[in-house]
Amino acid sequence: MLTIRKAENRDKPAVWQIIKSVIAGGDTYVFSPDTSEEEMIDYWFTPDKHNYVAELNGQIVATFWLRANQPGLGKHVGNAAYMVSPEEHGRGIGKQIALWSLDEAKRLGFTAMQFNFVVRSNTAAVKLWQDIGFEIIGEIPDAMVHAKNGLTNAYIMYRKL
């Protein structure tokens, strides 16, 4: 059974292992595969983010964060980032944390969610977001230098909560 909870400082080494595995391919996030642990942990755990981990059988298998997409008059729209350990792909963990995070976002006071950068070739993520009600509301041409595909577009995706 998957357990989702707030991340704690003691979780950072496990979170780093997931991040390192996910960015290694250079195909789903803009971070260079050689980005340092310190840089990624500093980015992932900034004070403006609500950080979470998902555990399966006592092991951290996913991490994600929620935050306001914009400050001030735009703070009612949330933003998020998710990473599932590549060893756990295909087990429905991404969908479970996504659905849980939407409820959590509502609890935190967000009225909608916007993802600013979903790599178009990341078809598993695009399908997941569409399956749970997100729409593609824009497309950024040549947004990322994909490790295999070269310049690749990214979607902006949105859903009311």
Image (tube, helix red, strand yellow):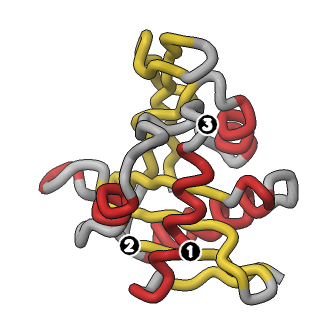
Q: CA distance from mark 2 to mark 3?
A: 26 Å
Task: State the image quarter where residue 65 is shown.
Answer: bottom left
Q: Nearer the viewer, mark 2 or mark 3?
A: 3
Check disc 2: other Cα within 10 Å, few if <14, some if 14-19, many if 20+. some
Question: Mark 1 = which residue?
Answer: 14
Tell me where residue 15 appears, x and y as whole percent.
Answer: 52, 69
Query: For this rendering, which residue is in front, 103 or 57?
Result: 57
Question: Mark 3 = which residue?
Answer: 25
Check disc 3: other Cα within 10 Å, few if <14, some if 14-19, many if 20+. some
Give the side of residue 143 with respect to residue 133, left or right: left
Amino acid tagged 2: His
Q: Which residue occupies 66% across, 34% down?
A: 126
- Whether tag 3 and tag 1 are in contact, CB under 8 A, the answer is no
Which element carries disc 1, helix, strand or loop?
A: helix
Amino acid tagged 3: Gly
The disc at residue 144 is none
The disc at residue 50 is 2
